[in-house]
Amino acid sequence: MSLDNFYRLRNNFLVVGLTGRTGGGCNDICEFLSAGENPFLKTDFIIPNNLHINEIQKFTICKNILTDQSNAWHTFSIIRYRDILLLFFLSQLYENTDKDLSASRN
């Protein structure tokens, strides 16, 4: 595949990886991005003031991008790492049990 074709594919999806410490706000951002309507356009929306200055800056950047008129809102789907791990383990279990997951084995 040529690079032109590869770069053309990125117009159809966006992957955002959120990582951080527990209580760092990743779950809050996931809730915002998975909302049916753009939560940043709500008139009562305010950036939480209990965040560190770095998080406020990141929040502001996200808000500016997501409220720009040239960007149409699309609800994001959340893929959690634990779901991927579960699918991986189930796949490995399936392969390692001769593709037979029934409870009764001879």
Image (cartoon, grey):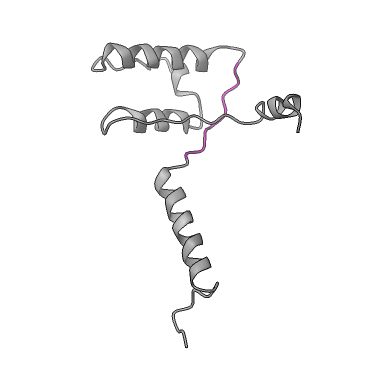
- Look at the magenta stretch and give its main secondary structure: loop
Which is nearer the eye, 23 or 98? Answer: 98
**Image quarter of residue 55:** top left
**Which quadrant holds residue 73?**
top right
The single residue placed furthest to the bottom in the displayed view is 106
Q: Is residue 28 above or below residue 104?
A: above
At 43% from the left and 43% from the top, the residue drawn is 80
Occupied quadrant, residue 56: top left
| Residue 77 in the image, given as x and y percentages of width and height | 51, 38
Residue 48 is a magenta residue: no
Q: Is residue 1 above or below residue 80?
A: above
Q: Is residue 86 above or below residue 68?
A: below
Range covered by the magenta-colored residues? 71-78
Q: Is residue 72 left or right of residue 4?
A: left
Looking at the rendered image, the quarter that the N terminus falls into is: top right
Would residue 72 be counted in the magenta stretch? yes
In-front residue for pair 79/98: 98
Give the x, y percent position of residue 54: 32, 13
The residue sitting at 35% across, 33% down in the picture is 27
Question: In the image, is 9 to the left or to the right of 48?
Answer: right
Identify the residue at image location x=53%, y=75%: 100
Front-most of residues 12 and 44: 12
| Number of marks drawn | 0
**Lateral position of residue 51 relative to residue 28, left or right:** left
Residue 22 in the figure: left or right of residue 95: left
Residue at 49% x, 69% y: name it: 96
